[in-house]
Image: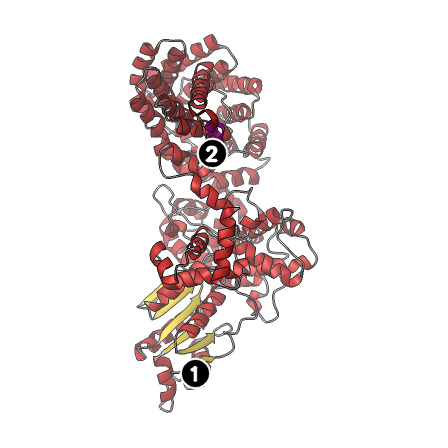
Amino acid sequence: MATETSGDLLTPLSSFVGRVDEMVEAGRLLRGTRLLTLTGTAGVGKTRLALEVARKEQRGRRQTIMVVELGGCAGQESVAGRVSAALDGHLDTGLLSAQARGVGAKLSGGLLVIDNCEHVIGECGLLVGRLLARYPGLQVLATSREALRIPGETLYLVNGLSLPGPDGRSSATEYLRSDAVRLFADRARAVVSDFELSPENAADTRAVCERLGGLPLLIELAAQLLRTLSVAELRERLDDPLSPLVGGWRTASARHRSWQAALTWSYDLLKPMEQLLFRRLSVFPGGFGVDAAVAVVTDEVPASSVPELLTALESKSVIQAPVRRGHKEAGVGRFLMLEPVRGYAHQKLLDLREEAPAYEGLTRWLANLVSPLWRTGIAPLDTLRTAGVELANLRHALERQAGDDDERRLLLAGGLVTLDTTPGAGTCTARLVRSALRAANPESRYRAIALEGAAMLAARRGAHIEALRTIQEAVDRERATAPSPLLCRLLLRLSLLKEQSGDRCGALEVLTASLRISEHLADESTFAVCVGHLARHELTCGDPASAAQLMDRALPAVRALPPEWQCDIMNVAGALAVERDDLSAAEGHFAEPLRSAMEGPGHVAGLIEGLAVVAVRRLQFDRGLHLISAAEKMGESATCGLRSHPWWRQRVEAAKAAGMNGLATRADRELALGRSLRSDGVVAYALGDGQPFAPAQDEAHRGPLSPRQWTVAVLLIKGLTNRQIASRIHVSVRTVETHVRNIRGTLGLRSRSHIAAWAAQTQQE
């Protein structure tokens, strides 16, 4: 049968950018099912992806392609009428009239694309079910913001276009690996012919694409504004993402001519209780689980109804469930609302004056979540993991309550400092802590925990006198009450700060006080940390035997502690083993927290130095120098604990000197290699996992190509066929074909031989 196409929707009016993986996956799914439904939020590009998949099927298979657009339909007869029009008017209530046997043959071997099913989802589902039952050879590719929910349906969730990686220092060329950035640049050139992504506008372009969630509709609307705005000005205006994005194409449906219209279309399809939950969830910029959702609607909705409502919102594509992509929240599914969607929902919340109960629920829930930081000495690791995913929500709640005298702000502020150790986050966090301390009652029971947070921030930025004064105030306030686990922790922090200031006697006195109170309260975790720090004092004073006895008491409990405390004590345990020349035990102690926590630079630099010392002691000079220079590059300031002590610094410097002497002229090269380690590969290398340097070289070579595209390009140098490449990298031949086609488009090259020549030359640079 010859290929036919109904309608003109398969003729594209603009270029199709990116979506390589989505095209491959959708095509694979379509070959294994009779009904494939592309779902996703408003503006995510479901329609365009479906049409591109249909065009690909049209090119590769001799079959009929029929396209039906359901926008504006209302009711079963209207849906049937649209489908009938695509079938030359032969569809009736009996599915096909007796005169339409030719159309029946068309259906039996064709692909029917049905676009925008969500507003007539029931009618569409019934009709598609009947068509599939009647015509065994028919395939249907549907787009909808929710599933048709009929037997045999396969769902494929369409997400936003890929965004640049987390490294904000990437070059403009590296940003072009992002489909979102490439689409923005492509559409920008359509309105400003000389637009180019440059070092000057790359960061602003990245921020615009991230702010718009990678949604193609929003990116296209934003790019049109470059007629009158620079990219930097556009970025500033997108603080209110709804107002400027209104100038869609004249050929687009009414709901796609502005972001407001697209979301209003989705919002109006929700039931009243779903609309209420949708509005209330806008107070969670960092995502939410079921318990959090319950907290913000508890005044209106029974808790037992919330899971079902969340499922409904997710099925209608107004929230997302990233648990499908591997994200977990302490073992519980976690939902997200794209930032542009949240902005719309939040405006609805304000319009209906529901912000007070929503934010009260948010504050109450967050305060309960971080309350173990007030009630315990060393907060349980599970508490920190659960609360740690709420950083964005904690920050938002504190920003929203700026100036309020609610004492719970003190608790939230202290929790934010404890949980957020991200480099560069201190300035914003310090402002929120100061605001909470100024506004709340000076006699609040939570004041000490906020003062502790302020002291920690001061210590992180090197303001040691301020840190010491602030933590002393917190201790004095907490001492006015009965001895508590919180007092033990405050004394422990005071001891570390006193030691840092050079007051070793004062530090030992305070540390001993914390030890006695924690023992009296049977607070095993705080007691273990105190004992571990006493072991450090003994070790650095030249008494490893006493240190070993203390460490034997501390280790069993320390292994269950959060990284902030565990890393310090295990570092001491490792250093003690090095001093006793037990290198295997030392390696185990240094590596254990890395394997369990895999924390950022704020905790692991000392452990990596320890592994470097072990490597040099084993005469592995190259590895030792790699690790020493990598730890130096991590930029962690050695402010307290073992890493700051001259005793340990002497051993690290001695190891570095021994390594340099051992390698002679190669030493500088090995140090440079260590500095070249990417931050996300340092821990893996320290643990002996993988080869860290080759990827960094590939990173420099591959230019705008993705890692997989670069691999294909390198294999083309060897003259391999698509089938041979597919066998090498374990993908289908069609996937390789798609990669080659997209490499040509990205690089502007005309043939496989040109790609091979480019890759060969790039490798030599």
Residue located 44% across and 57% down the image: 274
Q: Is residue 608 magenta?
A: no
At numbered mark 1, what does the secondary structure look like: helix, strand or loop? Answer: loop
Q: Is residue 252 visible?
A: yes
Foreground residue among 120 and 39 = 39
* Residue 673, numbered label: 2
Rendered-image quadrant of the N terminus: bottom left
| Image location (x, y in percent) of residue 666 | 46, 29
Foreground residue among 525 and 346 = 525
* Residue 536, numbered label: none
Q: Is residue 667 magenta?
A: yes
Crowding around mark 1 (Cα neighbors within 10 Å: few <14, some 14 to 19, many 20+) is many
The stretch of residues the image draws in magenta is 666-674
Q: Amino acid at mark 1?
A: Leu
Foreground residue among 292 and 218 = 218
Q: Which residue is mark 1?
A: 87
| Image location (x, y in percent) of residue 99 | 37, 91
Crowding around mark 2 (Cα neighbors within 10 Å: few <14, some 14 to 19, many 20+) is many
The chief SS type of the magenta part is: helix
57 vs 549, left or right, is right
Q: Which picture quadrant has residue 383?
A: top left
How many labels sit on residues? 2
